Amino acid sequence: MQANYFIRKVINKFSLLPKKKQCNICDSKVYDYLPLPDHYQKNFLKYGFPYTQKGAFETIDTDHFFCPDCYSMDRERLYAWYLKKNTVLTKNNRLLDFAPSASLSKWIKKNFTCQYVTADLFMDEVDVKTDIEDMKVFDTESFDFVICSHVMEHVNNDIKAMGEIYRVLKPGAKAIIMTPILKNFDGVDEDPSCTDVAERWRRFGQDDHIRLYSQKVFTTRLKEVGFTVESITAGQIPRDYALKAGLPANAVLYVVTK
Ligand SMILES: [Zn+2]
């Protein structure tokens, strides 16, 4: 395990150093957030993925990634900030969380009284097993909010998946749709037929990714299926809050409206 990760884990657990940060998901006081494990960096080098410099992607702070207590990721803390500030979801509302993460799921259940539905094609612990490209199990216009985080880079047909989110949302309802976005890039590299692990690492930066987006292509596709796209940047988040909650300084949060 890398030294930086291990040292911060120990400091967070045992040190009497002041804990000035606080996770907005589990509320734990934090000395510092943990870096992304170096498994990724090692594979980037091994397979020749070219975009390894810090800040190459939007919304990832590889140095302050996990909460040392609940292991929420930086982007999940970003979603919690947005949801708390901007959404009213009461018991008559339905929220769909596709490919949910454990810590954010727990936080949503604690903070909102809405009907919270989790879905995924492969995860066992979700409420509904379904393919995001064909969610016929859900009625049209049946959700008040959708969270779909880091799914589009995995699916064969992302436009179909985006279209399905559009279909199940009520008119005027919003969704958070996020994916890795490479900065200083205009196009898209995608190849659903690519199954070779080494090639996936080299082109897409992960062994189960088949697509690498630019902001331009990602937002254009969202607009093509009918969404209005809003991008909320780190500058719109109070700085004190962002530092305390460990939100990425290069955050771009995509909130779409039907
Ligand atoms: Zn936490």
Image (cartoon, helix red, strand yellow):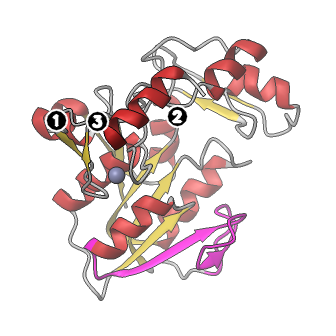
Is label 1 in a helix, a strand or a loop?
A: loop
Q: CA distance from mark 1 to mark 3?
A: 8 Å
Q: Quadrant of residue 138?
A: bottom right
141 or 22, which is in the foreground?
A: 22
Residue 202, horizontal then vertical, whole percent: 75, 20
Q: Which mark is residue 18?
A: 1
Residue 53, horizontal then vertical, whole percent: 50, 11
Q: Amino acid at mark 3?
A: Ser
Q: Which mark is residue 180?
A: 2
Is label 2 in a helix, a strand or a loop?
A: loop
Closer to the observer: label 1 or label 3? 3
Q: Answer whether residue 5 is visible to the viewer in this image.
A: yes
Residue 158, horizontal then vertical, whole percent: 63, 48
192 or 244, which is in the foreground?
A: 244
Q: Amino acid at mark 2?
A: Pro
Magenta region, mostly helix, strand or loop?
Answer: loop
Residues in magenta, as a range: 111-137
How dense is the environment of label 2, judged by Cα within 10 Å: few (below 14), some, or many (20 and up)? many
